[in-house]
Image: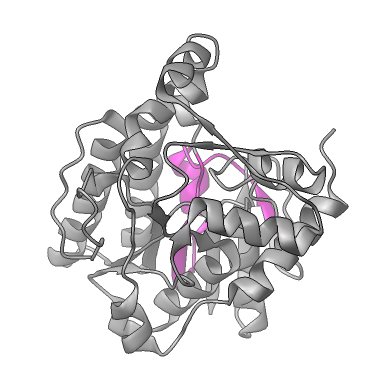
Amino acid sequence: MKHVVFGTGAVGSPLARELVARGEQVVAVSRSGRGDVGNASVLAGDAGDADFVGMATDGAAVIYQCLNAPYTKWPEFFPPWQRNLIDAAKASGAKLVSFENLYAYGPTNGAPLTEDLPFNATGKKGKVRGAMSAELLAAHAAGDLRATMGRASDYFGPAGLLTHMGERVFYPILAGKKAQVFGNPDLPHTFSYSLDIAAGLATLGTDDRADGQAWHLPNAETLTTRDIIGKIAEAAGTEGGVSPMPGFLVNIVGLFNGNVREIKEVLFEFKDPFIVDSSKFESTFGQTATSLRQSIPATLEWFRQNPKS
């Protein structure tokens, strides 16, 4: 069966490799036509071009939305991209699997996040994500297409540069310096591993039990941000440490940095415990997360092999 993956970033690329390993025919799509996708085919094109999306997905059995819009431009890019994929899935009869984050839930005051929580986001990015998810489920319920979505927390992993547990953590720790983090580092915070996200999305795409529902993809044990950075430093063989960025500094830096300015909207994740429950996925599909003993060294090795320029 033909599987088409839109996006060849930190999640889309390992998803393409995972699907190939499962014996599927895979086409990965990116604007540049590049990606670390192993034996998958790579196609250059723009998800905003409906004609191109239709051509790329012709004959597809499953389409995966793993696109990454500029952080400051979500309302402009994400909804039109997804609508093009929805239209393509309708035309081809393909199943559509959407990779989502957890912004749409909004603050939960420390209560664990489960798939049945309502969408209470007040910021624009959370509202965009919530509207996209609702639109996709409505299309499935109407019988227009088959759809499912896999949701993950802030993630780390190979090529995961611009995440909360990305280049601001791994590069400093490798250099024996302090990692820069937002919010309170002494609160529990669930972090996902990008390769677990990829494996979970592949399962959602190839198992009919996933259809018409949202799923929290498998996570390893939840630790405080300080504790997980301590494990990263231990694995790296450095002292490391944590340097929290206080709210007033976020405001100041945000005056000059659009990405940091946008982060203010989701700082609620780092002001209360942020614990993600993935038991529904694990009990249904029997797939669990990679242990931190494996995922942290694998991520460190990628950052070692790809030093900051």
- Does residue 32 lie above or below 198 as drawn? above
* For residue 253, side relative to residue 147 (left or right): right
Picture quarter with the C terminus: top right
Q: Nearer the viewer, residue 214 or 260?
A: 260
Residue at image coords 75%, 64%: 235
* For residue 248, side relative to residue 280 (left or right): right
Position of residue 283 measured from the top left corner of the image (x, y, whole percent): 32, 88
Residue 25 occupies quadrant: bottom right
Residue at image coords 32%, 79%: 279
Stretch in magenta = 42-68
Position of residue 100 measured from the top left corner of the image (x, y, whole percent): 38, 54
* For residue 269, side relative to residue 239 (left or right): left
* For residue 234, side relative to residue 182 (left or right): right
Residue 96 forms part of the magenta stretch: no
- Does residue 235 lie above or below 101 as drawn? below
Q: Is residue 171 visible?
A: yes
